[in-house]
Amino acid sequence: RRRSRQGQILRMPTPIAISLSIRVQMTKQQRLVLVISILASFVGALDGFIVNVALPAISADLGGGLAVQQWVVDAYLLTLGSFILIAGSLSDLFGRKRVLSFGLLGFGAASLLCAAAPNGTFLIIARGLQGVAGALLVPSSLAMIMSSFSGPVQSKAIGTWTAWFSIAAVTGPLLGGLIIASASWRWIFAINIAPIVVTLWLMRGIAQQKHP
């Protein structure tokens, strides 16, 4: 918090505050789209940060030393960065809902492969596939917001989506540390299944979207 010159207390906006400010201006369908977009992008972003805490445990279990640790991170980031621009075009061609659903299914399948990895090479390949699927999540979720909102409400919806996306950077290491302390490193990938299933279930309530 900070004080203005008039002595009034100004509170910095938070994701919850932004969400509350736009709730009354959104329709039920728009709220559903926003929740789906946040969940989908949050899963992809979270996985980019949570794995960093698990690298020593992964190396101790699968071997490979520092090289495996580096490639477990880089394989995800390289494929994510390479395919993220293509994902936007795919959303326009095949529909945002379809591409987002495919990305969620692919991300879930790749997460299970990561959780079951018998060695470092298998895990690196699975992480690469996870990055490809993750590249479909962010552009498609943002595109759904762009096509479902307009005017000032659209700006606030994007602000809410961005804020929750940023929270993944903080939540990832904390959640990863808790999982490593209480269970196997494999659970950092397996836990992706729950939010993915919830998101896919919620998506049944929205219509197929192609062009805005």
Image: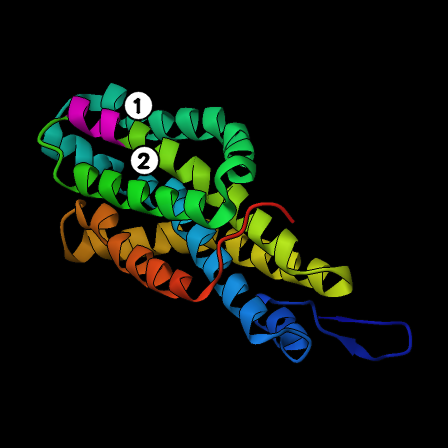
Part of the protein shown in magenta: 120-126
Q: Which residue is mark 1?
A: 71
Q: Residue at x 64, y 69 (%)?
A: 18
Mark 2 belongs to which amino acid?
Gln
Position in image of residue 200 (x %, y %) = 35, 58
Q: Kindly give the residue lying farthest to the right in the view shown.
A: 6
Q: Nearer the viewer, residue 169 or 32?
A: 32
User: Vertical placement of 78 versus 175: above or below?
Assistant: above
Mark 1 Cα within 10 Å, few/some/many (few <14, many 20+)? some
Q: Is residue 121 covered in magenta?
A: yes
Q: Quadrant of residue 202?
A: bottom left
Q: Position of residue 90 (x, y in %)?
A: 50, 34
The residue lying at 27 percent from left, 27 percent from top is 69
Q: Position of residue 180 (x, y in %)?
A: 21, 50
Residue that numbered label 2 is attached to: 130
Residue 99, by quadrant, is top left
Left or right of 81 on screen, residue 175: left
Could you say which disc has been placed on residue 210 in the image?
A: none
First reached walking from the N terminus: tag 1 or tag 2: 1
Query: What type is the residue that disc 1 sits on?
Result: Trp
CA gap between label 1 and label 2 equals: 13 Å
Q: Nearer the viewer, residue 173 or 91?
A: 91
Q: Is residue 120 left or right of residue 199?
A: left
